[in-house]
Amino acid sequence: MKLVVAIIKPFKLDEVRQALTAIGVHGMTVTEVKGYGRQKGHTEIYRGAEYVVNFLPKLRIEIAVASELAEKAVEVITANARTGQIGDGKIFVTPIDHALRIRTGETDSDAL
Amino acid sequence: MRAVTCRAAASAAPVGTRLTRRRRSYLGAGCALLAAGFTTPAFAQANTINTADTAWMIVATALVLMMTIPGLALFYSGMVRKKNVLATMAQSLAAVTLISILWVAFGYSLVFSGNGPWLGTLDRWFLAGMTMDSVNPAAKTIPEALFMLYQMTFAIITVALVAGSVADRMRFSAYLLFAIGWFMFVYVPLAHWIWGGGFLGSAGVLDFAGGLVVHLSAGIGGLVAAKVVGQRHGYGTENLSPFDLSLAVVGTGLLWVGWFGFNGGSALGANSRAVMAIIATHLAACSGALTWGAIEWSARRKPSVLGMISGAVAGLGTITPASGFVAPWQGIVIGIVAGIICYWACTWLKHRFKYDDSLDVFGVHGIGGLTGTLLTGIFATASIGGASGLLEGNPRLLLTQFYGVAVTLVWSAAVTFVLLKLVSLFVPLRVSREHELEGLDISQHGEALQ
């Protein structure tokens, strides 16, 4: 089992979600986050007081998938989250030791 | 003389009212008793009350109260950081609750009863002697009670305004003590001097709705407080950007509409003067907003919403002393001047002298009130308000206005300073460093926005 964590631009969420559903991933967790990398921030001015804001809003998507599906999931996310501009985001894949569905008690693959 | 008037009134009762002889004599006796109860001859008990004026002034009173809650509460809170939003609103709430009661207790009396040059009398201590029929000589066509209530709303908002300068860092208990003292020793004397028959009004200083009494006094008080209390932690280095400017915009709308009661109601009647004042007020807000926006567009490439609402409020504050004395179109000019001068004060002046006037009470209200008072001396039009300014060939008014500005400035600054030092002997003015970082909502009120 793999945990695929993707940081993407917020407006790409729907595309990514639909594409993942199409390959058989039927659940995800989404968090609103702030981040920066190579994409520059912007300047805000309030009555003469200038603030350079480095952090930009992003979305963090987490999906737990069977190891065999991980590579396909990464491909699909990449294809749908890319715009070609700096700031498209990154994807990290980490192994999952153990998974459990709380309602039924199913474990590991049955829980995904 | 009063008893005669009462008996005359009693016998002049219309035929259809079925005043029997016995009732008439009771009425006469009652009037005599009431007259005997009066200690000042200043309050007339005549049938001068006009229902139209009364109706409008009731509405105007409500409008001005609305300017503080929720107008100012929203305007200010939207501009502070999230962790201080509730605490900022608490300051406006506290102003309403405290000052209302103090006004009724002695404020109204000391400002508006008696014509002493320095202070009024305590004849109206807790409104003693005020009846259903009494009128204040300053506003003969509305019940005295209404005049008292209307003026209360002015006292409230003046005190609430000062808090803006020390937003994000003043201890709540210190603020309460300061608010009480500031009301007693800055607002009450000043209001009496200018509006209550005191020496400034007698000298001819014109302040239609509070350029000096409200805006300059609060602005200077705020400036001194900002300097004494000190800068916010992180000022100049950290991001102190507003929590939610949409709250501030809503607040501005409430202030703007409420100002129709603030300036329009200062005519104390439902008449053309009120309407002219309202037009001038509205136009000043519009031109102020456009001017500030235009300056930002050219200087910063973008007109900001904060700039537009600041310009509007600057225009409103500046037109306040002039609104009943100038022609409506002159409101446009005054608004433009306000936009320029207040923009300069909030940007260049503040950074040059390094004071952290968090919400620009001095930059907008202080400078606005000062400028407007002087502009009154320039633009005053006899056909509108009965006084002529510089443009109509009377330079003396401008000099008188300078005098009023000087006295207000010195008095408010000096008393504010002394008051703050006094309060600090009992409680620290600021919250602790940790509490400031944690936020006033949690540290002062035990609450947080989620």
Image (tube, coloured by chain):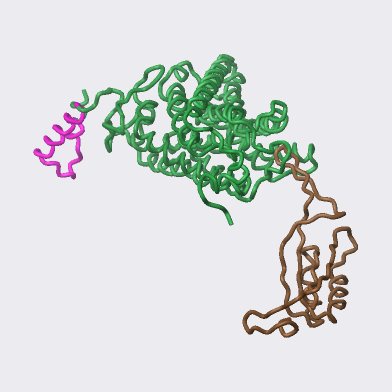
Chain colours: A brown, B green
Q: Give x and y (percent) for residue A90.
A: 85, 64
Which sits in the foreground, B48 or B136?
B136
Is B332 rendered above or below residue B401? below
- Rendered image quadrant of residue B96: top left
Q: Give x and y (percent) for residue A83.
A: 87, 64
- Rendered image quadrant of residue A98: bottom right
Range covered by the magenta-colored residues: B7-36
Q: Is residue B253 something one can see in this rendering?
A: no
Q: Is residue B376 something one can see in this rendering?
A: yes
Q: Is residue B20 magenta?
A: yes
Q: Residue at x 80, y 75 (%)?
A: A2
Residue most extreme to the right = A84
Q: Residue at x 12, y 36 (%)?
A: B26
Q: Please state, as top left, top right, bottom left or bottom right, where the N terminus of chain B lies in the image.
A: top left
Q: Is residue A16 magenta?
A: no
Which sits in the foreground, B333 or B445?
B445
In the visual, does B25 lie left or right of B84? Answer: left
Which sits in the foreground, B409 or B202?
B409
Q: Give x and y (percent) for residue B130.
A: 28, 33
- Rendered image quadrant of residue A68: bottom right
Q: Please state, as top left, top right, bottom left or bottom right, where the C terminus of chain B lies in the image.
A: bottom right
Is B315 rendered above or below residue B111? below
